[in-house]
Image (spheres, rainbow, N blue to C red):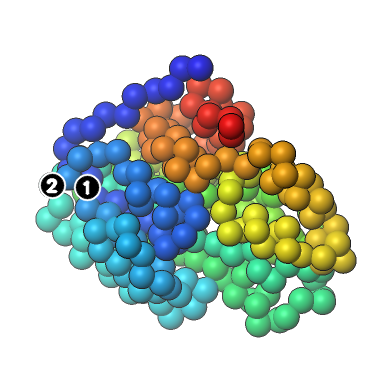
């Protein structure tokens, strides 16, 4: 299976939310460009990024801090590439609407739906005059198109992110910020552990994810992260919503 080469030239400025775990951590650890400055944005300190910004992105009062970090970091930047990957998210609380904890429900909506849009806006605002190649990548999910009772907030948020990417990519056009949404498939992260730990009453389709884990069909986060980096050198239409499982030319290796 053909795998594309990623150029390893010049300095890059990389922002990754959710860099303390899961795919976000894997992305921070696998940046393919030399002399990269990697800025992780998460509640907990991560040991991978060059720098860390402590922020709880479910709290709107924290968003301006991230916007200020974008502006400060790109001021005077003369490298080849600036990238923001929005990987932070949560699937908690899992359960039916009307039954789950209201505070957790609100934090879910803010982190998964509102924060990506606002942070995406702040990033594009900050890099409008930057001469480097500019990329904005939102992690999405097949849940944006599928029905999963007990997962309504997560699926709705990802569907909203997909549409935001389509519209914003159309606004940016050929010469603006490259805006992509990427669904990584089922990946061996803490999110999958949380799904398997639910009850059938909370998440009726839990057995599907138990079976995927049992049968070794969860992708490795590092493989997924490397593939996502590869996508940035592919001339997709701006605003594309991509599913790694449907991209055979860049698909991650099947789990052993």
Tell me: 131 left or right of 164.
Answer: left
Tell me: 169 left or right of 214.
Answer: left
Q: Which residue is found at the position 38% from the left and 56% from the top? A: 16
Query: Could you tell me which quadrant the C terminus lies in?
Result: top right
Q: Which residue is found at the position 58% from the left and 49% from the top? A: 188
Q: Is residue 232 above or below residue 90?
A: above
Circles 1, 2 touching at the beta carbon (< 8 Å): no
Question: In this view of the protein, can residue 103 be seen by the observer?
Answer: yes
- How far apart marks 1 and 2 lie (CA) works out to 12 Å
Closer to the N terminus: mark 1 or mark 2? 1
Q: How many numbered marks have been drawn onto this rendered protein structure?
A: 2
Task: Tell me if mark 2 has few (under 14), some (14-19) or many (20+) residues whose alpha carbon lies within 10 angstroms of its own.
Answer: some
Q: Residue furthest top?
A: 1
Q: Nearer the viewer, residue 238 or 154?
A: 154
Question: In this view of the protein, can residue 86 be seen by the observer?
Answer: no
Q: Which residue is found at the position 27% from the left and 54% from the top? A: 38
Which of the 4 image quarters holds residue 52? bottom left
Tell me: 21 left or right of 186.
Answer: left
- Residue under label 2, please give it: 78
Q: Is residue 249 above or below residue 170?
A: above
Q: Nearer the viewer, residue 16 or 214?
A: 214
Q: Which residue is found at the position 39% from the left and 23% from the top? A: 4
- Residue under label 1, please give it: 36
* Image location (x, y in percent) of residue 214: 72, 44
* Image location (x, y in percent) of residue 251: 53, 28
Task: Name the mark on residue 21.
Answer: none
Q: Nearer the viewer, residue 139 or 238?
A: 139
């Amino acid at each position: 299976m053909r795998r594309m080469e990623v150029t390893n030239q010049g300095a890059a400025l990389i922002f990754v939310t959710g860099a303390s775990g899961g795919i976000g951590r894997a992305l921070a650890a696998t940046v393919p460009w030399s002399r990269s400055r990697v800025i992780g944005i998460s509640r907990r300190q991560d040991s991978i990024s060059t720098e860390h910004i402590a922020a709880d992105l479910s709290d709107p009062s924290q968003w301006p801090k991230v916007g200020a970090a974008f502006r400060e970091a790109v001021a005077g930047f003369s490298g080849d590439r600036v990238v923001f990957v929005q990987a932070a998210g949560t699937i908690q609380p899992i359960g039916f609407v009307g039954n789950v904890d209201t505070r957790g429900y609100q934090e879910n909506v803010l982190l998964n739906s509102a924060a990506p849009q606002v942070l995406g806006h702040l990033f594009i605002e900050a890099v409008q005059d930057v001469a480097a190649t500019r990329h904005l990548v939102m992690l999405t999910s097949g849940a944006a198109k599928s029905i999963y009772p007990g997962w309504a907030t997560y699926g709705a948020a990802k569907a909203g992110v997909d549409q935001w990417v389509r519209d914003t990519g159309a606004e940016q056009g050929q010469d603006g910020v490259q805006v992509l949404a990427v669904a990584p498939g089922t990946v061996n992260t803490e999110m999958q552990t949380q799904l398997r730990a639910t009850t059938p009453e909370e998440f009726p389709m839990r057995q599907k994810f138990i079976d995927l884990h049992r049968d070794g069909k969860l992708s490795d986060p590092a493989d997924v992260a490397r593939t996502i980096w590869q996508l940035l050198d592919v001339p997709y239409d701006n605003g594309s919503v991509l599913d790694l499982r449907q991209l055979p030319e860049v698909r991650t290796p099947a789990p052993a």
